[in-house]
Amino acid sequence: MLIVAVFVAAGVVEAGGKEGADGVRLSRATGPLRIGIVGLVHGHVEGLLWNASKRDDITIVGIYEPNTALFERLMEKYKIDPAVRFDSLEKMLNEAKPEAVSVMSSIKDHLPAVEACAPRGVHVMVEKPLAFSNVDATRMAALAKQHGILVLTNYETSWYASLRQAKKLIETGGMSPLTKMVFRHGHKGPKEIGCTPEFLAWLTDPEQNGGGAIVDFGCYGAVLSTWLMNGERPTSVVASATTLKPDVYPKVDDDATIVLIYPHATAVIEASWAWTHDNKEADFYTGKGSIHAGKWEELSVRSENQPPNAVQPAPREFENEWVYLRRVIRGECAVDPLSSLEMNLVAVEILDEARRQVAANRK
């Protein structure tokens, strides 16, 4: 049975909700989206805290973070009301009554967050990836279906106009058929770029992150290839990983390659904490040339044996994940495929198999 929160906020009484596609219980609220935060140990949480301090369409109603010092540091930086902090996730959900939570914990802690939120009818957005194991991912999907909630996965690349336009070029036949995808994602390394101690601690813990770069950045190519192949699963996954900087990352890999084979295409996923620069780009090779999709609006098209030509992609539909989250929970837009359980379950299958192969090769 669905458990639906009842609360009064900003002069709006919320009692129950409307039902969307696939039995998902959507919100009837009209004010700012009431967001709860589960954990502050993920560095991306600062993007949410900054947005909440500048926007009037979202509001943070509760934060579950057991680390008092971490909460106080961010409270001071972003002028957070100390009353929104809770020592218990269940208490935060019961008393603050968020419409949705943003899970900013380790990847391993995604499942406990969904287990707490789902029976209460609270929607969930996790930072990428959904999970690193099939066991956790399938359990989250079952809970979402049972309780009628959305479990969404956020990737920075989901909001790149370049990638959206690249897919349109392929699907409309202007640049098709797609035969090869090459994804390059990563940076110099979480320690090298100055990740906080709390972030670094779980990113470099194989129990909490499932690996190093293979999970942290391999997930981008895993979900993007699934999206470009319209949800199709690869027929073969081949993976390798190594640690180029063992003194810095003794417990996890920092450089990985995953190769996906489809009936009519291949994908090469290069995930690394050893690039010389921040890297989030992809190249798509088709029967009529190639497409280079860089960060945000960076896009170029190259005909066979011709120099690349810059292309201006269509504007992004959503400014960021928080605009999207508010609209999808209020039933104002459909679930975007890149954030959907359907695509992300396949992405987790790819990651799980890649991790299995790497582990087997190290024995």
Image (cartoon, grey):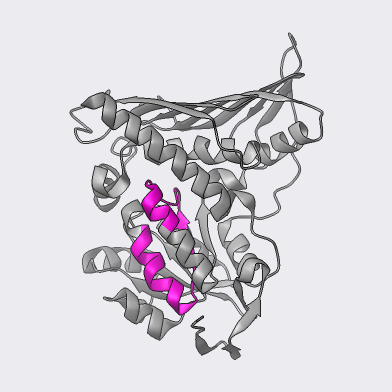
Relative horizontal placement of residue 284, taking residue 234 as reference (left or right): right
**Residue, x 67% and y 37% (percent of image)?**
162
Residue 341 in percent (x, y) is at 54, 55
**Residue, x 45% and y 82% (percent of image)?**
97
Residue 19 in percent (x, y) is at 65, 76
Q: In this view, does 149 lie above or below 160?
A: below
- Is residue 241 inside the magenta stretch? no
Relative horizontal placement of residue 17, taking residue 121 as reference (left or right): right
Residue 90 in percent (x, y) is at 33, 78
**Residue, x 64% and y 66% (percent of image)?**
22
Residue found at the very far top of the displayed protein: 305
- Is residue 134 inside the magenta stretch? yes
Relative horizontal placement of residue 270, taking residue 316 as reference (left or right): left
Instruction: Report the front residue among 334 and 272.
Output: 334
Instruction: Report the front residue among 302 and 24.
Output: 24
Number of numbered discs = 0
The magenta region covers: 110-138
Q: In which quarter of the image is the C terminus?
A: top left
**Residue 173: quadrant of the picture:** top right
**Residue 330: quadrant of the picture:** bottom right
Q: Can residue 38 be seen in this view?
A: no
Q: Can residue 257 be seen in this view?
A: yes
Instruction: Report the front residue among 153 and 41.
Output: 153
Residue 4 in percent (x, y) is at 52, 83
**Residue 75: quadrant of the picture:** bottom left
